[in-house]
Image (spheres, grey):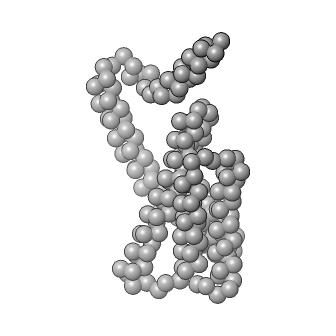
Amino acid sequence: TEQLSVKILLDDDEDEEEEEVPEDLTALSPEEQQRAIIRRAFSMLIIGTAIVLMFSDPMVEVLSEIAVRANIPPFYVSFILAPVAANASEVIASQYYASKKTRKTITVALTALEGAASMNNTFCLSIFMGLIYFRGLAWQFSAETLAIVLVQLVMYVYAQRSKMSTATGFVILSFFPLSVILVAVLEYFGLD
């Protein structure tokens, strides 16, 4: 039975490594599969880009209107709602991977979420700082910038760990509301 359990474990590891090919492409040769997957990927990128272009301005207007109607500074509305809307696809994809409950798929899910968060924060902060610098705008976002950079540094430390637990997940999840609270506290004490 020991040899059987070892074989089952090995089979599980092999199952974990199998690549998924869409069912409509399984009859094609590997080269044709690659071409079809690349074509499909580019068409989905084009469609996704068109959707983003169509809905980005209305989304900004909706967030601004929510802030006006709720009598809340626009930063807090956009800081809370925009990331949820912008990262919904990563969350859904990661949830799909994590639902398979294998070491590899959970690692892929966590890595995707960490990468998306890091890239979004770094990219958006860089664009924001570039606009401030090159347009000569007044700097009024020290509290927000400090909160973003601080969360990124703490996330860097957490991302270096080789093992994650549910408790670690809840700690990381708490960074989002804590960063909003940190911005409010810093602004309360006079940091612009």
Q: Quadrant of the C terminus?
A: bottom right
Residue 71: horizontal and vertical position, in percent? Answer: 69, 74
115 or 85: which is nearer to us? 115
Residue 23: horizontal and vertical position, in percent? Answer: 44, 21
Residue 183: horizontal and vertical position, in percent? Answer: 64, 75
Judge left or right: residue 81 versus residue 112.
right
Residue located 43% across and 84% down the image: 137
> In this orientation, does residue 97 appear?
no
Residue 148: horizontal and vertical position, in percent? Answer: 56, 69
Residue located 46% across and 25% down the image: 18
Q: In which quarter of the image is residue 41?
A: top left
Judge left or right: residue 155 versus residue 136.
right
Residue located 64% across and 87% down the image: 190
From this view, report whether residue 109 is shown above or below residue 65.
above
Q: Residue at the far front: name it.
A: 2
30 or 16: which is nearer to us? 16
Judge left or right: residue 120 versus residue 133.
right
Q: Quadrant of residue 151?
A: bottom right
From this view, report whether residue 7 is shown above or below residue 56.
above
From this view, report whether residue 43 is shown above or below residue 55.
above
Q: In which quarter of the image is residue 191?
A: bottom right
Q: Quadrant of the N terminus?
A: top right
From this view, report whether residue 95 is shown above or below residue 155.
above
167 or 91: which is nearer to us? 167
Residue located 47% across and 69% down the image: 125
36 or 126: which is nearer to us? 126
